[in-house]
Amino acid sequence: MSSPASRRRLNESISALARFTRSRKLDALHAERAGVSLNFPAFSVLGRLVADGPLGVGELGRRSHMAPNALSRQVKVLEDAGYLERRAHPDDGRSWVLAATPDGRAAHRRLREANETMLARQLRDWTDDDMDALAAGLERLVADLRRQ
C-alpha cells in the first residue's frame, strides 16, 4: 500500500510533466527543430491518423482520448496546414473519414525525429534499464487510471 506522501509526490510529478508537455515553449522548440509548427495535441492527432487512419471523427476521438470540441480544433489546425484531408467514408457516402496527407506524414516524421533527438540528448546519462523501468511504470499508471 502506498503512503499519502508517496501519492502526493507522484501527483506533483505528473502535474509537472503535464505542464512541461503542454508548454508553448516546448512546442516552439519542436517546431524550430523540425521545421513544422504544430502543438502537441495536433501532433498527437496526426500521429493517430498516420498509425491507424483513415478514421472517422468518432473513432479518432476515442483513439486520441480527446473530447469532441478539442478534437475539432486540432482537426481544423491540421486541415488548414494541409496535413489531413477528409474523404468519403468507404461504407457510408453520407459521412467522411480523416486521413493524413503525404505532407502530414512527412511533418509527423520530422516532429517525431526532432523529439527523439532532443530526448536522446536529455536522457544521455540514463541507462536502458532506467528508461525501461520508467516506461513500464508510466504504462501501468495509465492503464490503472483508464480503469477508473
Image (spheres, rainbow, N blue to C red):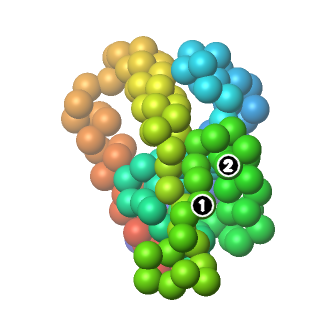
- Contact? badges 1 and 2 (CB < 8 Å): yes
Query: Whole-percent x and y of residue 12?
Result: 65, 49
Compared with 10, 62 (above or below) is below
* Amino acid residing under circle 2: Glu
Query: Label 2, on which residue?
Result: 79
User: In this orientation, which residue lies closer to the viewer: 65 or 37?
Assistant: 37
Query: Whole-percent x and y of residue 7?
Result: 55, 60
Query: Whole-percent x and y of residue 113?
Result: 42, 25
- From the viewer's perspective, tell me whether residue 79 is left or right of residue 84: right
Q: Looking at the image, which residue is at 50% across and 49% down?
A: 100
- From the viewer's perspective, tell me whether residue 32 is left or right of residue 139: right
Quick one: which residue is furthest to the front in this view? 93
Mark nearer the viewer, 1 or 2: 1
Camera sees residue 55: yes
User: In this orientation, which residue lies closer to the viewer: 113 or 97?
Assistant: 97
Query: Label 1, on which residue?
Result: 86
- Which quadrant of the rendered structure holds the N terminus? bottom left
Quick one: which residue is furthest to the left in this view? 129
The alpha-carbon separation of the residues under discs 1 and 2 comes to 8 Å
Camera sees residue 5: no
- Mark 2 Cα within 10 Å, few/some/many (few <14, many 20+)? some
Q: Looking at the image, which residue is at 36% across and 16% down?
A: 124
Q: Looking at the image, which residue is at 29% across and 44% down?
A: 133
What numbered label is drawn on residue 14? none
Query: Whole-percent x and y of residue 42?
Result: 63, 47
| Element assignment for label 1 | strand
